[in-house]
Image: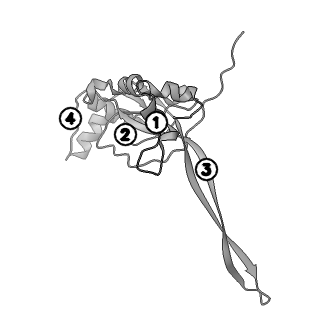
Amino acid sequence: MVEKKEALKEIPWEKTGVRLSAPSRTVKMIMPVCPESQSDDASGGSGCETTVGGAWWIECEKRGHDPYHQAKVVPHRAPIVREQEDGRQLIVGYDEQVELIRTPRVTQVPAGVRSNSGYLPDRKRFWHGYKMPHELGYKDMCEFRNCYNPNIKYRTKAGDFCDEMQAKMMLADTRHINLEVFLEEKRQDQIDGISV
């Protein structure tokens, strides 16, 4: 019997501060935080991190908690408009609602060879309970720093990227190619010479 695989979901993302001039590989992982530890008082709550110890994230899930997701608060505000007898419209108040959206706790984990020899994602998984997005039913994301695009188009030895220029910049970095800074034409020739 063949099991039917469910399609991976995309995590809503925004392009934030991607700097091609400073290539750095970061693996996007989902970080566990026990929802019971999210307390407003100074005690820090009584979450699984403090009461279980060790591999607390396993026990946390057994207790029915969801340490890999958070409730994101999205406020919605709509004006209440009344039309006057003379045809004018007045805003007499606002209808305010708050929507709670369940989102994964995505974080960037440095994975370049200059950061713990590239083994930090494995350490985070083993020692801290981090998971890859595909383990929780989401698409993996681009591995260029600050890029969360789930539409990966280039799979290279330097990582998985959504954009050709990102892939080339990371390959240049891992191959120790010092790109020209002042002569744009020479720099472009160097970049064109990098095959993805």
Q: Residues within 10 Å of mark 1 (few under 14, many from 20)?
A: many
Q: Mark 2 highlights which residue?
A: 145
Q: Amino acid at mark 2?
A: Arg
Q: Tell me how far mark 3 sits from mark 1, CA to CA.
A: 30 Å
Q: Determine the secondary structure under disc 3.
A: strand
Q: Earlier in the sequence, mark 3 or mark 1?
A: 3
Labels 2, 1: front one: 2
Q: Residue at x 27, y 24 (%)?
A: 117
Labels 2, 3: front one: 3
Is 125 left, or right, of 70 in this rendering?
Answer: left
Q: Tell me how far mark 2 sits from mark 3, CA to CA.
A: 28 Å
Outermost residue to the top:
1
Answer whether labels 2 and 1 touch (C-beta < 8 Å): no
Q: Mark 1 highlights which residue?
A: 162
Answer whether labels 3 and 4 touch (C-beta < 8 Å): no
Q: Report if residue 196 is visible in the image.
A: no
Q: Tell me how far mark 1 sits from mark 4, CA to CA.
A: 23 Å
Q: Mark 3 highlights which residue?
A: 100
Labels 1, 4: front one: 1
Labels 3, 1: front one: 3
Q: Measured from the top left, where is residue 54 in percent x and y?
A: 41, 24
Q: Nearer the viewer, residue 114 or 76?
A: 76
Labels 4, 2: front one: 2
Q: Tell me how far mark 4 sits from mark 2, CA to CA.
A: 19 Å
Q: Earlier in the sequence, mark 4 or mark 2?
A: 2
Q: Quadrant of the N terminus?
A: top right
Q: Earlier in the sequence, mark 2 or mark 3?
A: 3
Q: Which mark is residue 178?
A: 4
Q: Earlier in the sequence, mark 2 or mark 1?
A: 2
Q: Measured from the top left, where is residue 175 in percent x and y?
A: 26, 26
